[in-house]
């Protein structure tokens, strides 16, 4: 197919590279230099989003958040009538409903995972639309991105958005748990390495294994897999979703996300200190440890 791919940041580039062997790709990014890898791999580069979608049979977006989707796609009525729009952007359930109402061909397809799984084609992917034909088409399209056991078709973009937010909530809260476990270990005279080892027999084993290389200084947080800015943005979507449900009476009184709010406070402190573009493992480190200096 002729595919327009809009948004070639870290994740978008990896996703687009998987499509190049089988499709004719035209790419666009607000910062043109971020299309270079794809151009070198054989993609055409458009100077505007409108130019990219002009002859497209399908459009994929991988943007920073719902506001970027509104600006790039919704406000200019970018998607040609009848053309399937596959949005991998992390959005709230309400955002997904808004986009589906505005563009009937909308398919929510958020991905679960970081750059390593993206490169190896082992991400989790939700594909959400009530249109059975489009869902099957997109499931086939995105199969190169996904672990087959983690590729799921669901009945709406809203449901896909919920799945993605749940995954990132688990990631943010477990990272905060690891931060606090390391603090407890330090307070008891236990080394970070010993703490990581002991966590291997706990519910924090996954995050300790994922972020252990950053804690040990084996990897720098600079240019990391998932930035503090990005996961903080997702955390705010989750909090806004719960706050909105509480205010309109659709969730039980007193519903809140205190653990997530704690994680967001840690992330915001790092962002304020100038580490928003670092891997979110920055919340686990101090000083020179953060960047492997």
Image (tube, rainbow, N blue to C red):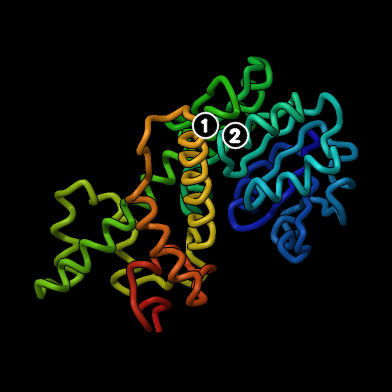
Q: Regarding mark 1 in the picture, which secondary structure is present there? A: loop
10 Å neighbourhood of mark 1: few (<14), some, or many (≥20)? Answer: few
Nearest the eye: 29 or 258: 258
Q: Is residue 16 visible?
A: no
Quadrant in which the N terminus is drawn: top right
Q: Which residue shows up at 82% across the image and 35% down it?
A: 79
Please identify the residue farthest to the top as the structure is shown. Answer: 132
Direction from residue 15 to residue 79 in the image, left or right = right
Query: Residue, x 90% and y 40% (percent of image)?
Result: 54
In this orientation, which residue lies closer to the viewer: 218 or 169?
169
| Depth check, front residue: 290 or 140 | 290
Residue under the point 74% across and 62% down: 36
Residue 94's tag is 2
Q: Position of residue 8 (x, y in %)?
A: 69, 54
Position of residue 105 measured from the top left corner of the image (x, y, whole percent): 74, 25
Compared with 28, 238 (above or below) is: above
Residue at which label 1 appears: 248
**Separation of marks 1 and 2 at Cα, in angstroms:** 13 Å
Taking 60 as reference, is 281 above or below it?
below
In this view, the mark in front (1 or 2): 1
Please rate how many residues cluster around mark 2, counting C-alpha atoms within 10 Å: few if below 14, some from 14 to 19, many from 20: some
Label 1 vs 2, first from the N-terminus: 2
């Amino acid at each position: 197919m002729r595919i327009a791919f809009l948004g070639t940041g870290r994740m978008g580039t990896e996703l687009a590279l998987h499509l190049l062997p089988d499709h004719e790709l035209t790419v666009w990014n607000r910062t043109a230099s971020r299309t270079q890898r794809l151009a070198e791999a054989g993609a055409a580069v458009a100077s505007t989003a409108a130019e990219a979608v002009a002859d497209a049979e399908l459009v994929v977006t991988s943007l920073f958040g719902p506001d970027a989707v509104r600006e790039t796609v919704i406000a200019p009525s970018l998607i040609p009538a009848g053309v399937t729009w596959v949005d991998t952007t992390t959005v709230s359930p309400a955002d997904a409903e808004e986009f589906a109402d505005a563009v009937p061909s909308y398919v929510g397809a958020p991905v679960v995972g970081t750059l390593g799984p993206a490169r190896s084609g082992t991400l989790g992917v939700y594909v959400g639309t009530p249109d059975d034909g489009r869902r099957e088409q997109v499931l086939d399209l995105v199969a190169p991105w996904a672990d087959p056991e983690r590729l799921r078709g669901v009945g709406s973009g809203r449901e896909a958005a919920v799945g993605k937010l749940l995954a990132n909530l688990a990631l943010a809260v477990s990272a905060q748990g690891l931060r606090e476990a390391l603090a407890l270990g330090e307070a008891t005279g236990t080394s970070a390495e010993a703490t990581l080892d002991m966590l291997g027999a706990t519910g924090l084993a996954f995050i300790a294994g994922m972020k252990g290389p950053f804690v040990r200084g084996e990897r720098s947080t600079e240019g990391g897999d998932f930035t503090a800015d990005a996961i903080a943005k997702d955390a705010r979507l989750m909090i806004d979703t719960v706050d909105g449900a509480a205010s309109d009476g659709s969730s039980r009184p007193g519903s809140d996300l205190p653990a997530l709010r704690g994680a967001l406070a840690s992330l915001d402190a790092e962002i304020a200190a100038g580490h928003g573009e670092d891997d979110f493992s920055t919340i686990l480190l101090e000083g020179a440890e953060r960047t492997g200096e």
